[in-house]
Amino acid sequence: MSAQHQILVIGGGGQLSTSLQEAAADFPEFELHVPDMHETDITDAGSVKAAFEKFRPALVVNAAAHTAVDKAESEEGVAFAINALGPYLLALECAAAGVPLYHISTDYVFDGEGDRPWREDDLVGPLGAYGRTKLAGEWAVAATHGDSLVFRTSWVFSPFGNNFVKTMLRLAEDRDELTIVGDQHGCPTYAPDLAKALLEAARGRLVGGEKRAGVYHFCNQGPTSWFEFAQAIFAKGVEFGFKQPEVRAIPTSDYPTPAKRPAWSVLDLERTRRDFGFKIPQWDDALDRCLARLAAERDS
């Protein structure tokens, strides 16, 4: 079957873009083009225009971001260029070409002061440079292109790149005890599950003619803390032959960082489930799949 729809994915080499490339095997109606940052620089209008002329996409997914949360505090201008200016330039080109834009955002747009899952229309209040620049990107996309979707996600992990799961397994190789923050709560997101959801949404849009716009949340189901997440990684990991150190919970105050993290980042998924009909797995199910993949690659 020949591909019918060209999808341009910005942010090649990242967890989500790599997951999208793998997930595309189950979506033969799409052909994905995933240039890396050297081929397509979203902070440069000419580079963005050249990508549209080369690939002529029917839909664009922006998976590029400056995600170094602490580093953003000292280089907010760089973070703004990637997280806000870049999405604006993409939205301009998408509007001119008449194609939808799917933009990935973050739970860090919220201030973390809460005790119920954050809904899409809740008041935002980012605590640091990363959240501010990502929120600016949301606003730029919404103001520039009416045919756009923003998907906020959180605590992304996968077999690819750098993430909490891989960091924990690496640290466990050399340490018998780890201290992990226990008073920050959120929802882990398995990048392959997010990738599948994005392509299902793209199928609904490009094949089914389902036109939606605005902000949605996507993460795996079930709130947890970083400490509880680490406990699960090691408890499950030992079944796959990974080491299991002792894990001790500490308060955020014992682990100072340049950027302040939101204490409560649990995202509400009701709107996403209602409008898209996604079957969203629990995060511990996703963790099993991730660990199995990492173990298989280790043993190969």
Image: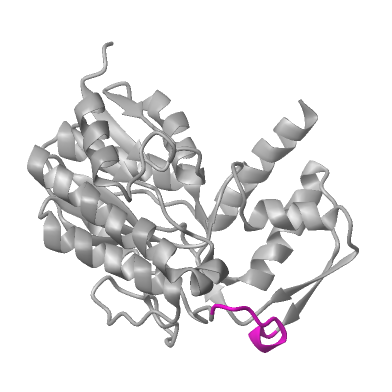
Residue visible at 65% across and 37% down? 293
Image-based side of 281 in relation to 202, left or right: right
Residue 188 image point, x, y percent: 53, 60
Residue 272 image point, x, y percent: 28, 58
Residue visible at 63% across and 70% down? 226
Q: Residue 250 versus residue 224: which sits nearer the camera?
A: 250
Q: Residue 86 versus residue 271: which sits nearer the camera?
A: 86
Using the rendered image of the protein, determine whether residue 261 is visible from the camera's viewpoint: yes
Question: Hey, which quadrant is residue 273 in on the image?
Answer: bottom left
Residue 141 image point, x, y percent: 20, 58
Using the rendered image of the protein, determine whether residue 98 is visible from the camera's viewpoint: no
Q: Residue 20 versus residue 76: which sits nearer the camera?
A: 76
Q: Main secondary structure of the magenta part?
A: loop
Residue visible at 31% across and 69% down? 135
Residue visible at 22% across and 51% down? 89
Tell me, what colour scheme is on the image?
one colour
Residue 234 image point, x, y percent: 76, 57
Figure check: 70 above or below 13 = below
Q: Residue furthest top?
A: 1
Q: Residue 148 versus residue 221: which sits nearer the camera?
A: 148
Image-based side of 94 in relation to 178, left or right: left
Q: Quadrant of the N terminus?
A: top left
Q: Is residue 116 on the magenta stretch? A: no
The magenta segment: 251-259
